[in-house]
Image (spheres, rainbow, N blue to C red):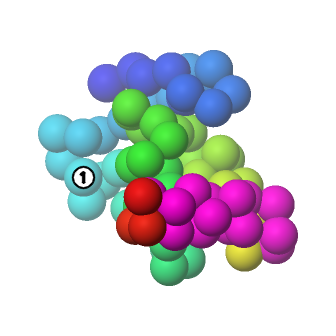
Amino acid sequence: MKKICQKCSTAFACREDRIELCQCSRISLNSGVRDYIKDNYDNCLCPECLKETNAYFNACVINPAYLEKINKAKIG
């Protein structure tokens, strides 16, 4: 199935019908990245954006803002 990445708008092949064959199943995501993606995107990201998000999540680019949002939601 062809999908459009919600982050970069690139078309890519998705195998949601057989997830074990999908490209995304070969990408090991760091802790918190999967939740971040679920909370910020309604559909799949392409493999390159998954890798990029994974790499930058703990590099003070995404994680601090995301954690602040989560903490505010728990308090408020």
Q: Nearer the viewer, residue 44 or 22?
A: 44
Q: Which residue is drawn at 25% across and 59% down?
A: 20
Secondary structure character of the magenta stretch overall: helix
Q: Which residue is drawn at 19% across and 47% down?
A: 18
Q: Which of 26 and 50 is in front in this view?
A: 50
Q: In which quarter of the image is the N terminus?
A: top left
Q: Residue furthest right?
A: 60
Which x, y percent locates residue 34? 44, 62
Q: Is residue 54 visible?
A: no
Relative to 75, say whether 76 is above or below: above
Q: Is residue 15 visible?
A: yes
The residues colored magenta run 59-73
Query: Residue flagged by tag 1: what amino acid is it?
Result: Ile
Q: Nearer the viewer, residue 41 or 47?
A: 41
Q: Left or right: 65 with respect to 34?
A: right
Q: Left or right: 43 with respect to 56?
A: left
Which x, y percent locates residue 50? 59, 53
Relative to 31, say whether 29 is above or below: above
Say if the magenta span includes residue 64. Answer: yes
Q: Which residue is drawn at 39% across and 33% down?
A: 43
Which x, y percent locates residue 37? 48, 50
Q: Which residue lies furthest to the front in this view?
A: 76
Total numbered labels: 1
Q: What element carries label 1?
A: helix
Which x, y percent locates residue 41? 47, 36
Q: Quadrant of the C terminus?
A: bottom left
Q: Left or right: 42 with respect to 65?
A: left
Q: Nearer the viewer, residue 60 or 34?
A: 60
- Label 1 neighbour load within 10 Å: few <14, some 14-19, many 20+: few
User: Label 1 belongs to which residue?
Assistant: 19
Q: Which residue is drawn at 55% across and 28% down?
A: 5
Q: Left or right: 10 with respect to 12?
A: right
